[in-house]
Image (cartoon, rainbow, N blue to C red):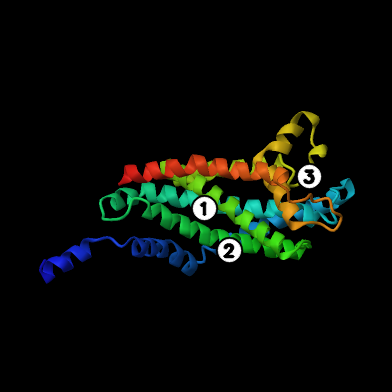
Amino acid sequence: MTAGTWLTSARATPVTVQQWWVLTSRLIVPSVKTGEVLSSILAPAAFTASFYIPLKTVMTFSGTGFSSYAQYMMPLVMLQAAAFTAIAAAFRAASDSVAGLDRRFGAMPIGPLVPVAARMSGNIFRLLIALAAGIVCGYVIGFRFRLDALHTLGFLAFSLLIGIAFTLGADVIGTVSKSPETVTQALVLPPLIFGMLSTGLAPASQFPQWVQPFVRNQPVSQFTIALRALAGDTKGNAGEVTWSLMGPPLLWVFVIFVVCIPVTIRLSARRA
């Protein structure tokens, strides 16, 4: 092989890591320069203020079994931060699809999973900011981690895992959507509905009896139960971190990944 032939071959060989980094930078750098990441900070703050301030007195009077309403409500703050990030992820995926970027990437020597990996990297970057903002908001209203460092790490890791599952599902929905605006509007409702009809804001016993089974067993309620146990409480009513308690929420996350990962691979292969 001549030197010229070797150089041509080397240049034609795609470097997956470099491709991923370039496409990831395409999403992260503009969002930082334009201040778009501020929405990842403002969204958890707006949700916390909108629900904590009007509900604190009412729920303190009604009773939650916790030392404070902030301790009880904190898991839902984290879940809503993840949900807001997921909505932005769907909008980004739909925008790329409608703009023809997916087709353009398919005509280039780019690995089939590189574009979605780059989008997910950008989503995780915004997710980390949103979760950090959620923690700050929780501390402002009075939330505290009441257990050891291992449980605290578990709280943060499980919040991140849930957020990744949400954003991956939203990325799939956005990829197959034909309108960024439509998919954004459609995804606003599920977090609100599941959040309201969950134990995130009030115990299941305070809901009408006919809807209590749904409230207890739907995924948002299971996620909040797990996060409360990992955060702990001075009254000891947050529950213990056992397999029986953590099993259902972990199963919900597993189901999301099992459904979304094959679809993501199929969509990426079809693009290529």
Evaluate whether residue 182 shows in this view: no
Tell which of 217 and 125 is nearer to you.
217
Q: Residue at x 80, y 30 (%)?
A: 209
User: Which quadrant of the view contains residue 81?
Assistant: bottom right
Q: CA distance from mark 3 to mark 2?
A: 27 Å
Residue at image location 72% in from the left, 41% down from the top: 198
Residue at the disc numbered 3: 202
Mark 3 and mark 1: Cα distance apart in space: 27 Å
Instruction: Tell me if 65 is positioned left or right of 4 in this view.
Output: right
Crowding at mark 2 (Cα within 10 Å: few <14, some 14-19, many 20+): some
- Give 57 or 134, whichever is nearer the viewer: 134
Q: Secondary structure at mark 1?
A: helix
According to the image, label 2 marks what residue? 129
Sequence-wise, the earlier of marks 1 and 2 is 1
Q: What residue sits right under mark 1 in the picture?
A: 88
Residue 120 percent location from the top left of the image: 47, 55
**Between marks 3 and 1 in the image, the one whose residue lies nearer the viewer:** 3
For marks 1 and 2, give the one nearer the viewer: 2
> Answer yes or no: do the residues labelled 3 and 2 have beta carbons within 8 Å?
no
Q: Is residue 212 above or below residue 95?
A: above
Judging from the image, what secondary structure is the residue with disc 3 in? loop
Q: Dot 1, how many residues are within 10 Å of its Cα: few (below 14), some (14-19), or many (20+)?
A: many
Q: Residue furthest top?
A: 210
Q: CA distance from mark 1 to mark 2?
A: 13 Å
| In the foreground, 7 or 201 | 7
Q: Position of residue 80 (x, y in %)?
A: 64, 51
The residue at 26%/54% (across/down) is: 108
Indicate left or right for 209 with 23 as reference: right
Mark 3 or mark 2: whose residue is earlier in sequence: 2
